[in-house]
Amino acid sequence: LYFADKLREWKYHTFDTEIIINTEASDDASTVVYSDRAGKPTAIKVIIRKPEGFEPHAGQILYVLIPSIDHVWHPFSLACATPDEHIELHIGIRGKTEIDAKAGRWVQPPETATWTYQLLEQVRALVQLSVDKTKIQSLPALVKGPYGSSFTNPFDPKFEAGAVIIGAGTGLTSALSV
């Protein structure tokens, strides 16, 4: 029964897609790296092409697998709403980064590089290609989901009261999707 359920999940909830990098597009339509005042990368806003049949709702999560990094599913809260054209994720850069004087940018040693840092490096490379070739670049990815439904009841017409949504820490991304 377990394997039948996993097969069903793979067939009906797993989508081939890609992360979009387009330096000529607005920040709403392209993956963007956010940095602090010192230039240290702190987060990546990842824009993923929404596959056909993927119907997200506010507050849900999805799992992302990027084969060029590893073959592990990573969970993230959605930062997009149902009518949005793309899937939006906000991913914090984890791990200890140090400034590389030669390269003039923040790096992690390859032997201790986190998954989020490896994603950052691939995004950086694709952003440079997009700038050099003035065209859209993409990074193949798989998404599984969406799962959960934490913010659907406040928008149900049978509930007349409004909703106050407070998000902090990991809950902030889910609150953004509302």
Image (tube, helix red, strand yellow):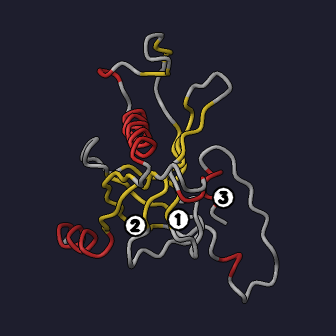
**Whole-percent x, y for residue 129 in the image:** 38, 42
Q: Furthest residue to the bottom?
A: 158
Which element is circle 3 on? helix
Residue bearing mark 2: 145
On the image, the x and y values in percent for residue 115 come to 37, 36
Tag 2 secondary structure: strand
In the image, residue 109 above or below residue 68: above
132 and 37: which one is in front?
132
Q: At 36% across and 26% down in the image, what residue appears?
A: 113
Q: CA distance from mark 2 to mark 1?
A: 9 Å
Q: Amino acid at mark 1?
A: Gln
Q: Which residue is mark 3?
A: 176
Q: Are marks 2 and 1 in contact (CB under 8 Å)?
A: yes
Q: Amino acid at mark 2?
A: Gly
Residue 23 bears which disc, if any?
none
Residue matched to label 1: 60
Position of residue 155 measured from the top left corner of the image (x, y, whole percent): 69, 79
* Mark 2 residue crowding within 10 angstroms, few (<14) / some (14–19) / many (20+): many
Where on the picture, by quarter, is residue 132?
A: top left
User: What element does badge 1 sit on?
Assistant: loop
